[in-house]
């Protein structure tokens, strides 16, 4: 942010620390003024840290702001408002209206400019603050530049405190706005403000649009302006003419009373009419009942007399004749019922029948136009009081914005309404309630007590998980258990005495466990947070009216509970996404290193002996989000663009992962459209599902089930379990199988491929019962149902793919006899291979033959035969190159051939003029010929103009998704750096492709290869100029392992086959490393010291290489050395040597060229890496580690 005087301000960064410390020329004086301070700690824990720099980027000032007097230990952070009011008065200064300056230092040459820039920025950022307070010891005089802008507050009790408080008013930098009705003469002031933000309306409605809007004001349309120093600097146009019915059909407005209110006069009239009708009905019933009762009484009396006379007669009374007594009783009973019905009618409290209830009136007005001078945007909410005054009978203000319009400052005060699932409305709806006009000032946050239980119970209502929240509240407020430390805490938010919110915390959070499983250290400098300053948010429930005050409520909880970091965990299967989630930042899950159980047991034994905590061992449970104090002043940028991702491939998941993990962005409308999308968010393709004996598919996913659980994509992504059948590019929508549409602003195509063999045979063959095309798990489920019901006698498995071999194994372990299975493989081209090494295929097929599986090579399935009931009876095979068709008896056909695009997806793409040339053609930014449609993964190929030999099917799909996100973010993110112009080169890929499968005989197969263009197959890789050598162990008929090195002895590929599973993800982290880093693998192998490659790569020394941060360490070290002169000189010498050209250069030759201090630098950085990751690398003893310290202390004792 640029300011007058050549001073620029920005948020403070850790790299500023040395420069800030240099500005403190007198440390003793600074400590006397501010108390004990550490610059690093302030940057990490301050609510707002601002650094001022000059035009050359030199740091010339720094200030730290808190929501309490942070560096003054004599003042309790939780109770400072009471301390301030008792000692200095000024009740207007509360936690909602004031911030505290804790530290300020500036270059004396520009200290006034620095102070002005920093304070103006602070008031703009902390928009709720009316004043910034500053506490100084009583014996310290105010200093420049503080004394020029801060006024002292009179101390009412000089003997009670040794501090003196000074205040800086917001009005010095951001004056209060005068809100008044707009006048036509405001036009000239407003035009430049309006055009600075949007020229669209001026182009559409004409040059005098603003003047015409102001002139059209009436009772239903109002225009307000904000004025500063006699000039209009903002405009707000309002209208009471709003279509609530349309909004009700597209948004969930139940929490907002459907934006309707009763028509009081009509309601009174309807009530009066209902009361009159009820009174009339009551009178009618009473009259009829009384008449009927009288008649019944008379009839009963007559019957009694008749009976008496009959009894006196000569013949006596007839037993069957009651002389009308029964009818009289019935009449009396009916009269009593009518009287009871009349008595039940209460005309005063009668309800108006639904059919007669008057229609409700709109209870909202809309904001149609808004603009504000950028300098005063933080004061946009000043408009709202006047807006509600213009429509005193309405309780809600609403506005709508197109999905692609960035949110502006006024919207930050509004609550976004959730669209209904069936909605295709092209705008986002925002609402603001009259009762929220006070904002944070209207709320009071305090610790909860047991007396709040009833109000909290009412607030929780029928909320999902209310029982767990209620139990946490009871644990926080109930009677403490003797000898047990209470870990639960509860706070309530009140408005005018009414409970409107509750916050529940658990202080028993295991931070070490979280750090082990999640990349929290990428964001949090744990050394600057107290061990007891962490807490887990169990729940935050707030009345929807005050939803935009969530950040303030959290800030108060941070302050009063004295925490600096709060976490939020969404466990697997979490049904409801908390409304507070957008305020938090998600931490990515970390790849876990597999360590031998013996080593873990040894380390834990050692830790127990040294009284150290044991290594974290619990698995991750769901996704983790966090919020620190400094993030409280950094509200996220909300992006409402509708991003629809078609397909649940690794590329699609990696794209979504990258988007949801941008720390300063929150994407509100992410969609994943794919069959079985819900399942794919939890279980990677090819991974054995719970209870299943084996998978039918090979695995190419580098996601694990635990990692997907820890990502919790389902909490951030709207899932549609379907395959699109059409794309309407003009309307920017995809069409789903049920005819519904899903609009998009950006469409990303990244579907999974699967077998399409039956589709290629035609619709008739695809409908044959007993023939299955294994596209995904839906097909395998249908196959197993058929297999267990029909018990097929002869099974053919067709396909020249790894899936076909995996399917044979899956069938055998499910009880299909091996001798009843025939594996038919189609001919392969020179660019295709099934296994990464021909020897592996020989061993696998030898295993199949020994089990009795029949192998048929180079044949194609060209047709099927079925009986009258449509049940498969035979399969027609044709040899390569044509020839006679052979019919073979077959009762079940399992097709697992080369993977292709699903037919309906292809037709949707091809039928809408998206260029498809064997694959969907994209540019270097993964964009198709439609600027709103992107594609990545196996479906895409780079345009021919790039002359790229790289196939996206040979790269890591996960890395491809990350690259796709990098290309898409500049379009979505206003702060993202541009990914390059139209001539940007094709992105490079370095992550290996990992393929694994479980094959017949329980053999485990894994292939890990670097994506080198022109090395798509084993033979091509061997013939490539970069090829060096292979290290192979091939000792048994059923095992094989090879390590491929390039001519510079860099690891390029692994291939494995054996009876034991290996950690292919770990091996992938070794790709790109010199073999010397693998404990001198090649020399040891040549010496016969490494007879078993897999066992060698499982040894304990490998843990540091498999660690998820080893790649980051290598990248950082490489970047540091790349600018080092001695390193550059050594590289120049090496590149001219013959050994470099021939690939015979040993690492020791390079190390010998470096000066001793550079060699020591590398060793130091390596020790730093190990020491910084001791929570997982504690098997390495380095200086300063916990185990080393404990051992040294034990020796001293």
Image: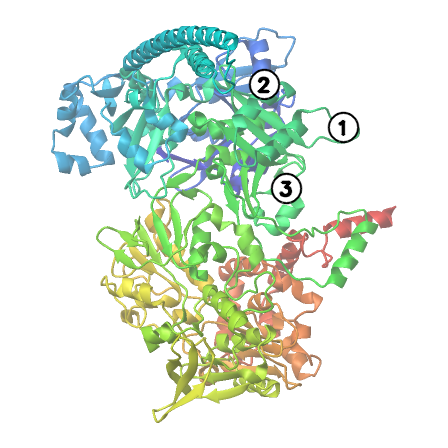
Q: Position of residue 906 (x, y in %)?
A: 31, 66
What residue is rendered at 53% in x and 38% in y? Answer: 627
**Mark 1 falls on what kind of element?**
loop
Residue mark closest to the camera, 2 vs 1: 1
Number of the label disc, if any, that sits on residue 80: 2
Q: Residues within 10 Å of mark 2 (few under 14, many from 20)?
A: some
Q: Nearer the viewer, residue 336 or 837?
A: 336
Question: Picture quarter containing residue 291?
Answer: top left
Mark closer to the chain start, 2 or 1? 2
Q: Position of residue 854 (x, y in %)?
A: 53, 87
Residue mark closest to the camera, 3 vs 2: 2
Q: Are marks 2 and 1 in contact (CB under 8 Å)?
A: no
Q: Nearer the viewer, residue 304 or 309?
A: 309
The residue where tag 1 is placed is: 481
1126 shown above or below 30: below
1008 shown above or below 1192: below
Q: Position of residue 944 (x, y in %)?
A: 28, 71
Residue lying furthest right in this view? 1197
**Mark 2 falls on what kind of element?**
helix
Residue lying furthest front in this view? 314
């Amino acid at each position: 942010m640029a300011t007058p005087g050549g001073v620029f301000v920005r948020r403070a960064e850790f790299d500023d620390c040395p420069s800030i410390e240099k500005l403190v020329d007198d440390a003793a004086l600074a400590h006397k003024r501010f108390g004990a301070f550490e610059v690093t700690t302030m940057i990490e824990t301050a609510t707002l840290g601002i650094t001022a720099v000059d035009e050359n980027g030199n740091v010339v000032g720094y200030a730290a702001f808190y929501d309490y007097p942070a560096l003054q230990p004599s003042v309790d952070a939780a109770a400072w408002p009471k301390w301030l009011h008792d000692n200095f008065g000024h009740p207007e200064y509360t936690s909602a209206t004031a911030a505290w300056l804790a530290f300020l230092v500036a270059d004396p040459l520009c200290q006034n400019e620095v102070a002005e820039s920093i304070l103006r920025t602070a008031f703009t950022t902390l928009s709720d603050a009316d004043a910034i307070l500053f506490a100084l010891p009583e014996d310290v005089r105010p200093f420049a530049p503080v004394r020029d802008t801060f006024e002292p507050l009179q101390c009412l009790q000089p003997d009670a405190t040794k501090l003196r408080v000074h205040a800086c008013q917001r009005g010095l930098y951001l004056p209060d706005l005068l809100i008044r009705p707009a006048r036509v003469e405001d036009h000239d002031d407003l035009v430049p403000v309006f055009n600075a933000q949007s020229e669209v309306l001026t182009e559409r409605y004409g040059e005098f649009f603003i003047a015409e809007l102001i002139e059209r004001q009436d009772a239903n349309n109002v225009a307000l302006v904000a004025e500063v120093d006699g000039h209009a600097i903002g405009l707000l146009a309002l209208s009471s003419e709003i279509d609530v019915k349309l909004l009700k059909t597209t948004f969930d407005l139940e929490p907002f009373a459907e934006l309707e209110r009763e028509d009081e006069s009509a309601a009174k009239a309807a009530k009066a009419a209902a009361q009159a009708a009820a009174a009339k009905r009551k009178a009618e019933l009473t009259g009829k009942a009384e008449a009927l009762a009288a008649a019944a009484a008379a009839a009963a009396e007559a019957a009694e007399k008749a009976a008496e006379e009959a009894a006196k007669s000569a013949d006596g009374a007839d037993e069957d004749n009651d002389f009308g007594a029964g009818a009289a009783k019935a009449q009396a009973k009916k009269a009593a019922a009518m009287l009871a019905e009349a008595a039940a009618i209460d005309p005063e409290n009668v309800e108006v029948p639904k059919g007669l209830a008057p229609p409700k009136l709109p209870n909202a007005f809309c904001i149609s136009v808004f603009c504000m001078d950028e300098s005063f945007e933080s004061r946009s909410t000043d408009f709202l009081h006047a807006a509600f005054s213009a429509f005193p009978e309405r309780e809600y203000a609403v506005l709508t914005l197109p999905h692609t319009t960035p949110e502006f400052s006024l919207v930050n005060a509004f609550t976004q309404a959730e669209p209904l699932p069936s909605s295709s409305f092209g705008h986002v709806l925002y609402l603001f309630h009259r009762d929220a006009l006070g904002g944070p000032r209207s709320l009071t946050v305090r610790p909860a007590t047991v007396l709040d239980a009833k109000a909290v119970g009412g607030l929780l209502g029928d909320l999902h998980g209310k029982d767990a929240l209620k139990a946490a509240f009871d644990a926080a407020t109930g009677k403490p258990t003797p000898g047990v430390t209470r870990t639960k805490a509860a706070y309530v938010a009140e408005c005018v005495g009414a409970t409107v919110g509750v916050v529940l915390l658990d202080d028993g959070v295991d931070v070490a466990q979280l750090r082990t499983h999640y990349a929290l250290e990428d964001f949090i400098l744990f050394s600057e947070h107290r061990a007891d300053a962490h807490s887990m948010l169990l729940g935050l429930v707030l009345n929807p009216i005050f939803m935009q005050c969530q950040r303030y409520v959290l800030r108060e909880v941070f302050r009063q509970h004295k925490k600096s970091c709060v976490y939020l965990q969404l466990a697997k299967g979490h049904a409801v996404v908390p409304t507070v989630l957008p305020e938090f930042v998600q931490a990515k899950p970390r790849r876990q290193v597999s360590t031998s159980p013996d080593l873990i047991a040894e380390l834990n034994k050692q830790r127990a002996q040294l009284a150290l905590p044991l290594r974290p061992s619990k698995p991750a449970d769901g996704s983790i989000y966090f919020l620190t104090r400094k993030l409280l002043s950094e509200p996220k940028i909300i992006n409402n663009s509708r991003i629809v991702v078609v397909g649940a491939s690794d590329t699609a998941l990696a794209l979504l992962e990258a988007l949801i993990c941008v720390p300063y962005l929150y994407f509100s409308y992410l969609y994943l459209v794919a069959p079985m999308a819900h399942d794919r968010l939890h279980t990677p393709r090819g991974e054995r599902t719970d209870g299943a004996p084996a998978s039918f598919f090979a695995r190419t996913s580098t996601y694990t089930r635990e990692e997907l659980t820890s990502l919790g994509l389902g909490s951030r992504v709207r899932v549609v379990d379907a395959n699109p059948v059409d794309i309407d590019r003009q309307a920017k929508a995809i069409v789903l199988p049920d005819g519904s549409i899903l609009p998009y602003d950006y469409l990303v195509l990244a579907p999974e491929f699967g077998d399409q063999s039956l589709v290629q045979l035609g619709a008739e063959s695809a409908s044959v019962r007993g023939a299955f095309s294994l596209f995904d798990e839906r097909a395998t489920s249908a196959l197993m149902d058929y297999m267990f019901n029909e018990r097929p006698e002869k099974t053919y498995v067709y396909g020249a793919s790894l899936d076909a071999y995996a399917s044979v194994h899956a069938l055998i372990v499910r009880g299909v006899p091996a001798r009843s299975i025939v594996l038919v493989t189609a001919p392969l081209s020179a660019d295709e291979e099934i296994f990464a090494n021909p020897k592996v295929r020989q061993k696998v097929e030898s295993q199949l033959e020994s089990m009795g599986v029949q192998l048929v090579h180079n044949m194609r399935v060209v047709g099927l035969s079925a009986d009258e009931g449509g049940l498969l009876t035979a399969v027609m095979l044709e040899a390569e190159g044509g020839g006679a068709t052979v019919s073979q008896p077959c009762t079940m056909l399992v097709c697992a051939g080369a993977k292709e695009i699903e037919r309906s997806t292809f037709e949707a793409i091809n039928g809408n003029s998206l260029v498809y040339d064997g694959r969907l053609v994209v540019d270097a930014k993964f964009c198709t010929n439609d600027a709103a449609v992107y594609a990545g993964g196996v479906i895409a190929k780079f345009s021919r103009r790039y002359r790229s030999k790289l196939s996206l099917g040979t790269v890591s799909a996960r890395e491809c998704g990350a690259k796709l996100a990098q290309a898409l973010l500049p379009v979505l993110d206003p702060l993202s750096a541009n990914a390059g112009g139209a001539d940007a080169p094709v992105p490079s890929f370095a992550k290996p492709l990992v393929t694994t499968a479980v094959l017949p005989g329980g053999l485990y197969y894994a292939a890990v290869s670097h994506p080198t263009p022109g090395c798509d197959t084993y033979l091509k890789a061997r013939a490539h100029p970069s090829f060096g050598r292979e290290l192979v162990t091939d000792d048994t008929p059923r095992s094989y392992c090879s390590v491929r090195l390039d001519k510079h002895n860099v690891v390029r590929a692994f291939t494995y086959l054996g009876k034991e599973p290996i950690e292919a993800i770990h091996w992938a982290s070794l790709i790109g490393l010199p073999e010397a880093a693998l404990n001198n693998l090649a020399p040891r192998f040549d010496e016969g010291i490494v007879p078993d490659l897999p066992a060698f790569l499982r040894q304990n020394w490998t843990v540091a290489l498999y660690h998820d941060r080893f790649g980051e360490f290598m990248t950082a070290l490489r970047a540091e050395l790349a600018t080092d002169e001695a390193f550059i000189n050594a590289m120049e010498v090496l590149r001219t040597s013959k050994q470099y050209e021939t690939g015979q250069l040993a690492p020791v030759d390079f190390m010998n060229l470096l000066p001793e201090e550079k060699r020591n630098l590398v060793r130091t950085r390596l020790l730093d890496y190990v020491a910084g990751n001791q929570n997982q690398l504690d098997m390495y003893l380095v200086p300063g580690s916990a185990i080393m310290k404990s051992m040294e202390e034990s020796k001293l004792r």
